[in-house]
Amino acid sequence: MKTLLVTGASRGVGFEICKQAAVEGHKVITLSRNITPLKGMQNIHPFAVDLSIESALVDFVEEIKTSFRSIDVLINNAGSLINKPFLEISSSEFEEVYKVNVFAVATLTRLLLPMINTDGHVLNITSIGGVQGSAKFPGLSAYSSSKGALIILTELLAEEFKESGPSFNALALGAVQTEMLEEAFPGYQAPHSAAQMADYIIDFALKGHQFYNGKILPISSSTP
Protein backbone atom coordinates (compact mmCIF):
# COMPACT_ATOMS: atom_id res chain seq x y z
CA MET A 1 0.00 0.00 0.00
CA LYS A 2 1.20 3.49 -0.84
CA THR A 3 1.15 6.89 0.84
CA LEU A 4 -0.56 9.56 -1.26
CA LEU A 5 -0.83 13.27 -0.62
CA VAL A 6 -3.72 14.98 -2.40
CA THR A 7 -4.59 18.68 -2.54
CA GLY A 8 -8.04 20.08 -3.23
CA ALA A 9 -9.53 17.14 -1.39
CA SER A 10 -12.85 18.40 -0.09
CA ARG A 11 -14.96 18.20 -3.25
CA GLY A 12 -15.14 17.07 -6.85
CA VAL A 13 -12.41 14.91 -8.33
CA GLY A 14 -10.09 15.46 -5.36
CA PHE A 15 -12.60 14.11 -2.89
CA GLU A 16 -13.26 11.06 -5.03
CA ILE A 17 -9.52 10.40 -5.40
CA CYS A 18 -9.10 10.42 -1.63
CA LYS A 19 -12.18 8.28 -0.97
CA GLN A 20 -11.36 5.65 -3.56
CA ALA A 21 -7.65 5.45 -2.68
CA ALA A 22 -8.51 5.06 1.00
CA VAL A 23 -10.99 2.28 0.27
CA GLU A 24 -8.24 0.50 -1.68
CA GLY A 25 -6.17 0.58 1.51
CA HIS A 26 -3.73 3.37 0.71
CA LYS A 27 -2.75 5.95 3.30
CA VAL A 28 -4.05 9.31 2.10
CA ILE A 29 -2.89 12.69 3.40
CA THR A 30 -5.35 15.37 2.30
CA LEU A 31 -5.10 19.13 2.06
CA SER A 32 -8.06 21.48 1.73
CA ARG A 33 -9.46 24.52 3.44
CA ASN A 34 -12.56 22.57 4.43
CA ILE A 35 -11.81 19.16 5.94
CA THR A 36 -15.33 18.42 7.22
CA PRO A 37 -16.24 16.03 4.35
CA LEU A 38 -13.09 14.00 5.07
CA LYS A 39 -13.33 13.62 8.83
CA GLY A 40 -13.72 10.13 10.23
CA MET A 41 -12.89 8.32 7.00
CA GLN A 42 -10.59 5.34 7.41
CA ASN A 43 -7.04 5.71 6.03
CA ILE A 44 -7.55 9.46 5.45
CA HIS A 45 -5.49 12.04 7.33
CA PRO A 46 -7.04 15.48 6.66
CA PHE A 47 -5.25 18.79 7.16
CA ALA A 48 -6.90 22.20 6.86
CA VAL A 49 -4.52 24.32 4.81
CA ASP A 50 -5.00 27.45 2.70
CA LEU A 51 -2.74 26.76 -0.26
CA SER A 52 -2.53 30.44 -1.18
CA ILE A 53 -0.61 31.20 2.03
CA GLU A 54 3.03 30.09 1.78
CA SER A 55 3.61 30.11 5.54
CA ALA A 56 0.69 27.68 5.95
CA LEU A 57 2.38 25.28 3.55
CA VAL A 58 5.66 25.54 5.46
CA ASP A 59 3.89 24.82 8.76
CA PHE A 60 2.02 21.87 7.27
CA VAL A 61 5.17 20.19 5.94
CA GLU A 62 6.93 20.66 9.26
CA GLU A 63 3.95 19.06 11.00
CA ILE A 64 3.77 15.92 8.88
CA LYS A 65 7.50 15.22 8.98
CA THR A 66 7.09 13.68 12.42
CA SER A 67 4.16 11.45 11.44
CA PHE A 68 4.90 10.30 7.89
CA ARG A 69 8.27 8.92 6.89
CA SER A 70 7.85 9.26 3.15
CA ILE A 71 5.40 9.95 0.34
CA ASP A 72 4.98 7.78 -2.74
CA VAL A 73 2.61 9.99 -4.74
CA LEU A 74 1.88 13.71 -4.66
CA ILE A 75 -1.25 14.69 -6.57
CA ASN A 76 -1.46 18.46 -7.01
CA ASN A 77 -5.17 18.55 -7.74
CA ALA A 78 -6.35 21.81 -6.15
CA GLY A 79 -7.53 24.50 -8.52
CA SER A 80 -8.94 28.00 -8.35
CA LEU A 81 -11.22 29.36 -11.07
CA ILE A 82 -12.69 32.78 -11.78
CA ASN A 83 -15.11 33.09 -14.69
CA LYS A 84 -15.04 36.77 -15.59
CA PRO A 85 -14.40 38.80 -18.77
CA PHE A 86 -10.76 39.83 -19.11
CA LEU A 87 -11.56 43.56 -18.95
CA GLU A 88 -13.41 43.05 -15.66
CA ILE A 89 -10.99 40.81 -13.78
CA SER A 90 -8.72 42.64 -11.35
CA SER A 91 -5.00 42.11 -10.89
CA SER A 92 -5.60 40.74 -7.40
CA GLU A 93 -8.16 38.21 -8.72
CA PHE A 94 -5.74 37.12 -11.43
CA GLU A 95 -3.01 36.72 -8.83
CA GLU A 96 -5.23 34.70 -6.50
CA VAL A 97 -5.82 32.13 -9.23
CA TYR A 98 -2.09 31.85 -9.89
CA LYS A 99 -1.35 31.54 -6.16
CA VAL A 100 -3.31 28.30 -5.98
CA ASN A 101 -2.80 26.89 -9.47
CA VAL A 102 0.91 27.62 -9.91
CA PHE A 103 2.73 29.13 -6.93
CA ALA A 104 1.28 26.73 -4.33
CA VAL A 105 2.14 23.75 -6.52
CA ALA A 106 5.73 24.94 -6.86
CA THR A 107 6.08 25.71 -3.15
CA LEU A 108 4.46 22.52 -1.86
CA THR A 109 6.41 20.35 -4.29
CA ARG A 110 9.70 21.99 -3.32
CA LEU A 111 9.01 21.57 0.40
CA LEU A 112 7.91 17.94 0.04
CA LEU A 113 10.64 16.71 -2.32
CA PRO A 114 12.91 15.52 0.51
CA MET A 115 10.02 13.27 1.64
CA ILE A 116 9.01 11.97 -1.78
CA ASN A 117 10.56 8.63 -2.69
CA THR A 118 13.02 8.81 -5.56
CA ASP A 119 10.91 6.27 -7.45
CA GLY A 120 7.76 8.22 -6.58
CA HIS A 121 5.42 10.25 -8.74
CA VAL A 122 4.39 13.89 -8.71
CA LEU A 123 1.19 14.18 -10.72
CA ASN A 124 -0.13 17.62 -11.55
CA ILE A 125 -3.79 17.93 -12.51
CA THR A 126 -4.10 20.61 -15.15
CA SER A 127 -6.73 21.44 -17.76
CA ILE A 128 -7.19 20.81 -21.46
CA GLY A 129 -7.82 24.57 -21.59
CA GLY A 130 -4.15 25.11 -20.73
CA VAL A 131 -2.90 23.02 -23.64
CA GLN A 132 -1.60 24.95 -26.63
CA GLY A 133 -3.94 24.62 -29.61
CA SER A 134 -6.93 23.40 -27.62
CA ALA A 135 -10.28 25.22 -27.65
CA LYS A 136 -10.26 28.33 -25.46
CA PHE A 137 -13.26 30.03 -23.87
CA PRO A 138 -14.00 33.64 -22.84
CA GLY A 139 -13.92 34.40 -19.13
CA LEU A 140 -11.23 31.87 -18.30
CA SER A 141 -8.12 33.94 -18.99
CA ALA A 142 -6.69 33.54 -15.48
CA TYR A 143 -7.63 29.89 -15.06
CA SER A 144 -6.55 28.54 -18.44
CA SER A 145 -3.32 30.54 -18.57
CA SER A 146 -2.39 29.36 -15.07
CA LYS A 147 -2.99 25.76 -16.12
CA GLY A 148 -0.74 26.37 -19.11
CA ALA A 149 1.96 27.57 -16.72
CA LEU A 150 1.52 24.40 -14.67
CA ILE A 151 2.09 22.32 -17.79
CA ILE A 152 5.43 24.02 -18.48
CA LEU A 153 6.42 23.71 -14.82
CA THR A 154 5.75 19.97 -14.99
CA GLU A 155 7.98 19.56 -18.01
CA LEU A 156 10.77 21.60 -16.42
CA LEU A 157 10.74 19.67 -13.14
CA ALA A 158 10.78 16.34 -14.97
CA GLU A 159 13.92 17.47 -16.76
CA GLU A 160 15.56 18.81 -13.61
CA PHE A 161 14.98 15.61 -11.62
CA LYS A 162 15.21 13.02 -14.39
CA GLU A 163 18.43 11.54 -12.98
CA SER A 164 17.47 11.50 -9.30
CA GLY A 165 13.67 11.13 -9.37
CA PRO A 166 10.84 11.41 -8.66
CA SER A 167 8.94 11.43 -11.94
CA PHE A 168 6.72 14.36 -12.93
CA ASN A 169 3.69 14.15 -15.21
CA ALA A 170 0.46 16.05 -15.77
CA LEU A 171 -3.05 15.05 -16.78
CA ALA A 172 -4.90 17.76 -18.69
CA LEU A 173 -8.53 17.10 -17.87
CA GLY A 174 -11.46 17.95 -20.06
CA ALA A 175 -15.00 18.30 -18.78
CA VAL A 176 -15.82 16.40 -15.58
CA GLN A 177 -19.14 16.84 -13.77
CA THR A 178 -18.02 18.89 -10.76
CA GLU A 179 -18.83 22.15 -9.01
CA MET A 180 -15.93 23.80 -10.82
CA LEU A 181 -17.32 22.80 -14.21
CA GLU A 182 -20.61 24.42 -13.25
CA GLU A 183 -18.74 27.63 -12.42
CA ALA A 184 -17.00 27.63 -15.80
CA PHE A 185 -19.85 26.33 -17.98
CA PRO A 186 -23.20 26.67 -16.18
CA GLY A 187 -25.66 23.98 -17.23
CA TYR A 188 -23.16 21.94 -19.24
CA GLN A 189 -23.43 18.17 -18.77
CA ALA A 190 -20.04 16.49 -18.83
CA PRO A 191 -19.50 12.99 -20.24
CA HIS A 192 -17.64 11.83 -17.12
CA SER A 193 -18.37 11.89 -13.40
CA ALA A 194 -15.87 12.87 -10.72
CA ALA A 195 -15.79 9.24 -9.55
CA GLN A 196 -14.93 7.96 -13.03
CA MET A 197 -12.12 10.47 -13.46
CA ALA A 198 -10.78 9.77 -9.97
CA ASP A 199 -10.52 6.06 -10.77
CA TYR A 200 -8.43 6.88 -13.86
CA ILE A 201 -6.22 9.34 -11.98
CA ILE A 202 -5.45 6.94 -9.13
CA ASP A 203 -4.41 4.22 -11.55
CA PHE A 204 -2.17 6.64 -13.46
CA ALA A 205 -0.72 8.10 -10.27
CA LEU A 206 0.31 4.65 -9.06
CA LYS A 207 1.52 3.21 -12.37
CA GLY A 208 1.93 5.92 -15.01
CA HIS A 209 5.42 7.02 -13.97
CA GLN A 210 6.70 3.57 -14.96
CA PHE A 211 6.06 4.58 -18.57
CA TYR A 212 6.01 8.40 -18.62
CA ASN A 213 8.09 11.29 -17.33
CA GLY A 214 7.65 14.93 -18.26
CA LYS A 215 4.55 14.14 -20.27
CA ILE A 216 1.26 16.02 -20.53
CA LEU A 217 -1.61 13.67 -21.31
CA PRO A 218 -4.90 15.21 -22.48
CA ILE A 219 -7.82 13.34 -20.87
CA SER A 220 -10.85 14.63 -22.74
CA SER A 221 -13.58 13.20 -24.91
CA SER A 222 -15.51 16.43 -25.42
CA THR A 223 -15.25 20.18 -26.01
CA PRO A 224 -15.02 21.70 -23.49
Image (cartoon, rainbow, N blue to C red):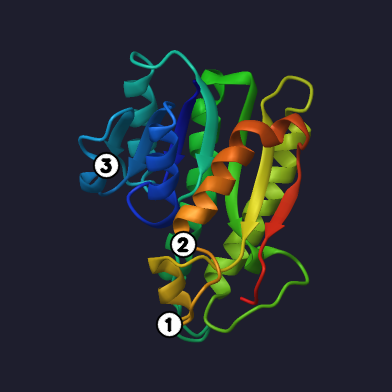
In depth, the one of 142 and 39 nearer the eye is: 39
**Mark 2 neighbour class, 10 Å CA radius: few under 14, some 14 to 19, many 20 or more:** many
| As drawn, 99 above or below 67 | below
First along the sequence among labels 3 and 2: 3
Tell me the quarter of the image containing the C terminus.
bottom right
Q: Earlier in the sequence, mark 3 or mark 1?
A: 3
Q: Which residue is mark 1?
A: 186
- Tell me, yes or no, if residue 79 can be seen here: no
CA gap, disc 3 and disc 1: 27 Å
Which type of secondary structure does the marked residue at label 1 adopt? Answer: loop
Residue in the image at 31% along x and 41% along y: 49
Name above or below for residue 163 compared with residue 22.
above
**Residue 86, horizontal then vertical, whole percent:** 53, 82
Q: Quadrant of residue 64?
A: top left
Left or right placement of residue 55 versus residue 120 in this view? left
Residue 97, numbered circle: 2
Which of discs 3 and 2 lies nearer the camera? The answer is: 3
Q: Is residue 131 left or right of residue 61?
A: right
Question: Label 1 amino acid?
Answer: Pro
